[in-house]
């Protein structure tokens, strides 16, 4: 009997909460070993699947430290966050703070994520979080959501690592889902200004190479990207599913553009819940 999924409690631009019900079914149908997710973010797919064995990583060391802390001390983190208010004065005070304790750092991370503009994680040249106040008025966090998610992360190995190191471990029966920051070789895709500083076209080339190598080791690999020929051409012979959504970064609904995305699969998925087309070699 499949385990019911969990909603992510972090906000994350580019996260796959909107696609998790469909994509988790596809990946679950292929999984008999370990689930790997090397661009974890809020972990929407992992939480939707709740696999028995998982290796999760991200280059964002603050995110990984936060999740490791929530994994062990969810109640303490929530209690610390509840002492704070979703107000501009409190936000900038917390943003400028440097907590000394593990619980304090985790509470700060969760608080800023839930109250900053768009859930964006951005550091300045000095390595300080510099996203402005979101003024959303939302509840900062729900205790039950955090505690429930912490139980799922207890089955996973978490590490701050480059995707190549994580994906190199996968083989027969394993599933990899890679959801990198979206970039193409050229400009003008709406993501390039911010994501190019995080994940360059050279990284896309390296990811495609590592993904193909994992597929050769008989892992089932899925990679998300923009519906753009430059990205799709990196995966000749793979199966492609197309999706369209509204951008989740914007001050209001009118400013959010439609985005065409794809997920490329190393072979045709077994699940019937997704429509794919093969890209010729």
Image: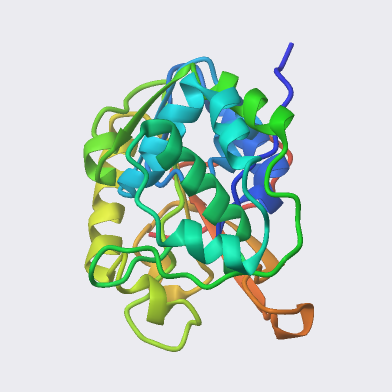
Q: Is residue 176 visible?
A: no
Residue at image location 41% in from the left, 70% down from the top: 130
Q: Quick check: 159 left or right of 271?
A: left
Q: Is residue 27 above or below residue 140?
A: above
Residue at image location 29% in from the left, 45% down from the top: 163
Q: Quick check: 240 left or right of 60?
A: right
Q: Nearer the viewer, residue 115 or 79?
A: 79
Which quadrant would the C terminus be assigned to in this image?
bottom left
Q: Position of residue 53 (x, y in %)?
A: 46, 17
Q: Position of residue 58 (x, y in %)?
A: 35, 44
Which quadrant would the N terminus be assigned to in this image?
top right
Quarter of image, res 62: top left
Q: Position of residue 8 (x, y in %)?
A: 64, 40
Q: Is residue 9 visible?
A: yes
Q: Nearer the viewer, residue 201 or 273?
A: 201
Q: Nearer the viewer, residue 246 or 213?
A: 246
Quarter of image, res 38: top left
* Tally of numbered discs: 0
Q: Quick check: 63 left or right of 118?
A: left
Q: Is residue 18 above or below residue 185?
A: above
Q: How is the image coloured?
A: rainbow
Most extreme residue toward the top, as rendered? 1
Residue at image location 34% in from the left, 51% down from the top: 98
Q: Position of residue 221 (x, y in %)?
A: 43, 40
Q: Quick check: 69 left or right of 11?
A: left
Most extreme residue toward the bottom, as rendered? 188
Quarter of image, res 145: top right
Q: Is residue 196 above or below residue 150?
A: below
């Amino acid at each position: 009997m499949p385990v019911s999924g969990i909603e992510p409690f972090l906000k994350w631009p580019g996260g796959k909460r909107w696609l998790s019900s469909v994509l988790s079914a596809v990946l679950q149908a292929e999984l008999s070993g370990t689930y790997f997710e090397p661009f974890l973010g809020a972990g929407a797919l992992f939480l939707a699947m709740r696999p028995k064995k998982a290796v999760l990583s991200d280059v964002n060391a603050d995110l990984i430290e936060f999740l490791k802390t929530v994994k062990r001390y969810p109640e303490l983190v929530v209690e610390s966050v509840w002492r704070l208010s979703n107000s501009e004065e409190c936000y900038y005070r917390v943003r400028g703070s440097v907590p000394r304790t593990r619980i304090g750092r985790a509470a700060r991370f969760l608080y800023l994520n839930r109250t900053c503009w768009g859930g964006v994680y951005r550091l300045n040249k000095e390595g300080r979080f510099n996203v402005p106040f979101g003024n959303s008025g939302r509840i900062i966090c729900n205790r039950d959501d955090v505690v429930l998610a912490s139980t799922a992360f207890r089955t996973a190995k978490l590490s701050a690592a480059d995707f190549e190191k994580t994906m190199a471990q996968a083989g027969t029966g394993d599933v990899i889902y890679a959801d990198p920051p979206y970039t193409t070789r050229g400009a003008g895709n709406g993501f390039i200004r911010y994501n190019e500083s995080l994940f360059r076209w050279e990284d896309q080339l390296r990811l495609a190479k590592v993904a193909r190598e994992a597929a050769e080791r008989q892992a089932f690999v899925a990679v998300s990207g923009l519906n753009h020929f430059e990205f799709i051409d990196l995966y000749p012979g793979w199966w492609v599913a197309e999706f369209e959504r509204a951008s989740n970064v914007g001050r209001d609904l009118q400013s959010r553009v439609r985005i065409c995305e794809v997920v490329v699969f190393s072979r045709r998925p077994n699940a019937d819940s997704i429509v794919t087309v093969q890209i010729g070699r």
